[in-house]
Each structure stands twice: as structure tokens, then as C-alpha cells.
Image (spheres, coloured by chain):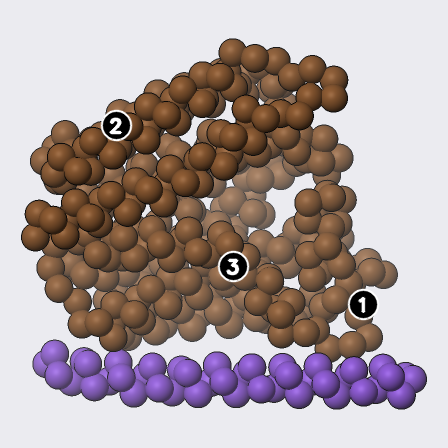
Chain colours: A brown, B purple
């Protein structure tokens, strides 16, 4: 990480929209959604105000971790077309402001979660923030092509936190919800990495396609898609959900597997549009939304 | 700093202060309702 760069010295105060952009609102929407689903699917009852506070804390914690991620990676972001116009590499904000904003969001989210909702939920939220900001961003991402596999755990925490907010303890079901996102993350990000490979290579990030090559990445996408099929069906198999979730998990995972197989058994050509990879990436986002929505619908029908 | 930059500087600072005030007010309201909910729960 460079500590001084001329482009990171804006003369004007940052616009509030730039602070908002630092929290990665689109990623946060998925985090909030899965956290909310964990909260709604959990057995038990939570006061609506406390439930709202729990989701707000999950959102603030995820936003704060995203801010710290961009504070740390500003020089890397400047090298990639996809991220070069973010507030820090774009020179629209001071790095110290981003760091302070990120720390404020992280600390506030954990403290409010602990005081208002549950200490265990606050502990897991703090763990997820450290996992993403330190273990993934600072340690794994620049060092190993397995960064996404292990770092994917960071995005898997929200449903677990939502569940704990209601029940106050950890059981097999929320761990399986964690496992679903954990298993879903590698094929989701590797599909993206396949069509932005040159950008990652330029920034020196050891993403799987850069280090192990395209062929190996495509094979691993397929392996994870097969594992995901089993993991996604596990909540139904252990009797934690009903047939609505079971059917949805089977259909969605089968489509995911079919799209992954299409990616696995091809090689990109010069000037390739990478359509199958882009379709897999787009479907993977829909997959997670639909699967967790099915979980909540199933729970509400059962109730 | 040119007059245009000065004007933009003031506009941005005002907008940021407004957002911070709104955020703080939101937290106050949230803490109020959390307190009511917790007292009711006990």
C-alpha cells in the first residue's frame, strides 16, 4: 500500500455521496437481504424495533468494512478500470476521512448491536468485520489465489448474525446458511474474475485465473457448483425447512450447475465476449436472492 | 481558491453537515425506540 499519492489530495471537502459510495451500497443490499432472511427464518420472535436495529447494524458493519477495504486498497483500485473512479483513487476524498468514517461505522455497529440486540450477535458482527477488513483485505487478498475461498466467509456472516439476533445462540441451521454463501462465493467471484482477468493481473492481485490459469479456474467453478448443490439442499435434508425451500434450492442449484458446466467446458478465444461467464455471474446474484427468499417464504408458510 | 471553488466548498460543507445532522438525529430516534422496546421487554 502506498501512503502518499498526488491524486489522493483533494482541495474540496468530499461530497456526502462519495461517503455513501464508499460503503458499496449494491453489495450492502445483498448483505442486508441475507441478514434479514436469517432474522425472519429464525425460530422465535424479536421486537420489530430491535429487528430493525439488528439489520441496521449489519448494514453499518458491512458498509464500514467496505470503507476500510477501499481505504487500504486505494492504490490497487487506481490500477483497475472497474475501480479507478471510486472516491479515493478518483481523488475526491482524503484517505484519513475514509479511514475515520469506516472505523466509526464499524465501532458504532458493534456497540449498538451489543447494547440493543445481543452480545453474541455483536461478537459475530465484530468477527465478520475483522475477517473482511483484516484477514481478507490486508492479509489474504494480496497473497494467495485462495483469497476468495477463505475470504468468502466474510460475506457469509449476515444470515448467521440475523439468526443469532433472534435466538441468541448458534445452531446447525444458521451454520448451513453460512455454508451456502461460503460455497457460493468462489464461483460467483471467479466468474467475474474470468472476464476482468486483465485488470486483476495489472494490479498484481493473485486471483485464481491470474495464478492458476483459466482452465483450472473453470474446473474449480464446476467443483464448487456441485458442492453448492449439496450444501443448498442440506437445510431441507436435515428437516430444517419444508418442501418449498427444498424445491427452490434444487431448481436454482441445478441451473447454477448447468451454467457453471457451460463455463467449465469452454476456453475463451481472443476477442471473446465471455457471455457464459457474464451469465453465470448475473445468475449467481439472482440465485442468492431467490434462495434466501424461498427460505423465508417456506418458514412463513410452515408457521 | 477561486470564487467558484469557494462557493462549491461552502455548498459541499453545508450538504455534509446536513447529512451528519440527519444521521445523528436518526441515531437519537433509534436509541429512544430501542430504550422503549428494551424497557417493555423487561
| Number of marks in the rendered image | 3
Q: Secondary structure at mark 2?
A: helix
Of residues A94 and A225, the one nearer the viewer is: A225
- The reply to whether the C-beta atoms of the residues labelled 1 and 3 are less than 8 Å apart is no
Task: Please identify the quarter of the rendering in which residue A178 is found.
Answer: top left
Of residues B29 and B41, the one nearer the viewer is: B29
Q: Is residue A260 left or right of residue A254?
A: right
Graded by Cα atoms within 10 Å as few (under 14), some (14 to 19) or many (20 or more), the crowding at tag 2 reads some
Mark 2 sits on what residue? Answer: A250
Q: Residue at x 16, y 45 (%)?
A: A298
Q: CA distance from mark 2 to mark 3?
A: 30 Å
Q: Residue at x 55, y 16 (%)?
A: A216
Q: Secondary structure at mark 3?
A: helix
Mark 1 sits on what residue? Answer: A9
Q: Is residue A221 above or below residue B36?
A: above
Please tell me if label 2 and label 3 are on a single chain: yes
Labels 1 and 3: the sequence-earlier one:
1
Q: Residue at x 65, y 17 (%)?
A: A268
- The reply to whether the C-beta atoms of the residues labelled 2 and 3 are less than 8 Å apart is no
Residue A201 in view: no
Mark 3 sits on what residue? Answer: A25
Graded by Cα atoms within 10 Å as few (under 14), some (14 to 19) or many (20 or more), the crowding at tag 3 reads some
Which of the two marks, 1 or 3, is nearer to us in this view? 3
Amino acid at each position: 500500500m502506498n501512503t502518499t499519492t498526488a491524486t489522493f489530495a483533494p482541495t474540496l471537502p468530499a461530497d456526502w455521496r462519495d461517503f455513501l459510495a464508499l460503503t458499496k451500497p449494491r453489495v450492502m443490499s445483498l448483505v442486508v437481504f441475507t441478514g434479514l432472511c436469517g432474522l425472519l427464518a429464525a425460530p422465535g420472535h424479536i421486537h420489530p424495533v430491535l429487528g430493525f436495529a439488528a439489520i441496521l447494524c449489519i448494514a453499518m458493519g458491512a458498509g464500514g468494512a467496505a470503507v476500510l477495504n477501499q481505504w487500504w486498497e486505494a492504490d490497487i483500485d487506481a490500477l483497475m478500470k472497474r475501480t479507478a473512479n471510486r472516491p479515493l483513487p478518483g481523488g475526491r476524498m482524503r484517505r484519513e476521512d475514509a479511514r475515520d468514517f469506516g472505523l466509526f461505522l464499524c465501532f458504532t455497529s458493534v456497540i449498538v448491536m451489543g447494547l440493543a440486540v445481543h452480545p453474541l450477535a455483536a461478537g459475530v458482527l465484530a468477527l465478520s468485520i475483522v475477517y473482511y477488513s483484516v484477514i481478507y483485505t490486508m492479509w489474504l487478498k494480496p497473497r494467495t489465489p485462495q483469497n476468495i475461498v477463505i475470504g468468502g466467509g466474510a460475506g457469509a456472516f449476515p444470515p448467521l448474525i440475523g439468526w443469532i439476533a433472534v435466538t441468541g445462540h448458534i445452531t446447525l441451521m444458521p451454520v448451513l446458511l453460512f455454508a451456502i454463501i461460503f460455497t457460493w462465493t468462489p464461483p460467483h467471484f471467479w466468474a467475474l474474475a474470468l472476464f476482468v482477468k486483465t485488470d486483476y493481473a495489472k494490479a498484481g492481485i493473485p486471483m485464481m485465473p491470474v495464478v492458476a490459469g483459466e482452465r483450472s479456474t473453470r474446473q474449480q467453478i464446476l467443483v464448487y457448483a456441485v458442492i453448492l448443490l449439496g450444501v443448498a439442499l442440506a437445510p431441507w435434508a436435515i428437516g430444517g425447512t419444508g418442501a418449498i425451500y427444498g424445491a427452490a434450492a434444487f431448481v436454482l442449484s441445478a441451473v447454477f450447475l448447468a451454467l457453471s458446466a457451460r463455463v467449465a467446458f469452454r476456453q475463451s478465444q481472443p476477442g471473446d465476449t465471455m457471455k457464459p461467464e457474464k451469465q453465470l455471474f448475473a445468475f449467481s446474484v439472482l440465485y442468492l436472492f431467490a434462495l434466501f427468499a424461498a427460505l423465508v417464504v417456506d418458514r412463513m408458510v410452515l408457521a | 481558491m477561486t470564487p467558484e471553488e469557494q462557493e462549491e466548498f461552502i455548498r459541499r460543507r453545508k450538504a455534509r453537515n446536513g447529512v451528519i445532522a440527519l444521521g445523528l438525529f436518526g441515531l437519537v430516534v433509534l436509541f429512544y425506540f430501542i430504550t422503549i422496546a428494551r424497557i417493555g421487554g423487561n
